[in-house]
Amino acid sequence: MTCEGYFGHRTRLYELDIYNNPEKIASIIVKAYEKGVRAMNIPNDSCLLDAIDIAKGQGADMKIIGTVGHTDVNYLAPNFKKAREEVDYLTDIEILSNYDTPLMLVDDILVDGYDWDYTAKVLEEIKDHNIIPGIITSYPFKTSRQLVDDCIDLDLFDFYMVPVNKIAYTMDVDFFVKEQQEELKTLLNQINKKVIISRILACGIQSPKEAFDFLEKLDYADMVTVSAASEREADETFGLLLNK
C-alpha cells in the first residue's frame, strides 16, 4: 500500500477529500490491514504519520517502506535542482527510522535528476542507519538504461521501484506493448534488484482486475504498491489483489 500523493488525473479530488485528515486516512489503513496488507510506502509527512499512529492504536500495525527526499516541488514539471536544495533527507531518515521501517527508498524527484553522486550519498546515509536502501524512478526506461551503464555503484541499493502499467500511463514510453515490455524486462534483469511495481492501476484509469491480470504476467515483479482513497476502494482493491 502506498500513501504517496500522486493519483494522476484524480490527484486534486483526493487532496480535497482526504489530505490533512488523519482520521480518515487511518480508517483506510485499518481496512487495508483487515484485507491482509502489512506494509505501507510513505514519505515523512506529519499527517500520514499521525494516521499511522491512529491506525496502530486500532490494531493495524504496519511496517513502513519510507520514501526519503519527498518535496513539494511539482512532480509533473519537476525542477530537480530546486528539489535537491529544498530536501532534508537526513531529517526524513531520522523520523522514519522511529517507526518499523526495514526499507527506505530515495524519492524519484532526487533520483531522476541524475545527480548520481548525490543519490549515492543519500543511499549511504540510509545504509549507515542499518536500513535496506532502494531507489524510485518515474522514468523506468531512461533511468534503467543509465543504471545498466554503471552510472552508480549498484551495490549501494537493493530495491528499485518503477511505474509499470498496461497502458503506459505516467511511463516514459508512448506504448507498452511487446517490444517495450521485453526491453524493460531485459533492463531490469540486468540491474538485478528487487523490483517494486508502482502505478499498476494507471492512477485509477484501469480497474483493479485489469491491472492485476496484467501484473500476473510481469515475472520480474517482486512487490507492488497500490493506492486507495477510501475504505471501499481498499476493500475492493486489496481484496482482489491478495486473493490472486
Image (cartoon, helix red, strand yellow):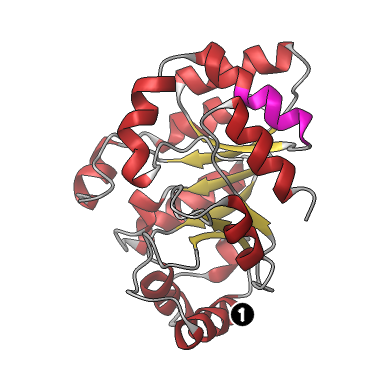
Q: Amino acid at mark 1?
A: Asn
For label 1, the crowd category at 10 Å Cα-Cα, with few meaning under 14, some 14 to 19 and many 20 or more, is some
Q: Is residue 69 above or below residue 23?
A: below
Q: Residue furthest bottom?
A: 179
Query: Is residue 190 toward the left or the right of residue 34 in the image?
Result: left
Secondary structure at numbered mark 1: helix
Kindly tell me whether residue 130 is visible in this rendering: no
Kindly tell me whether residue 103 is visible in this rendering: yes
Residue under numbered circle 1? 189
Where does the image place residue 216, in percent across and percent down from the top left? 69, 67
Query: Is residue 143 toward the left or the right of residue 181 in the image?
Result: left
Q: Is residue 179 above or below residue 117?
A: below
Magenta residues span 28-35
Asked if the stretch drawn in magenta spans residue 34, the answer is yes
Where does the image place residue 49, in percent across and percent down from the top left? 55, 20
Please name the residue shown 50% across and 61% down the image.
162
Quarter occupied by residue 71: top left
Q: Is residue 29 above or below residue 126?
A: above
Where does the image place residue 26, in percent across and percent down from the top left? 60, 18
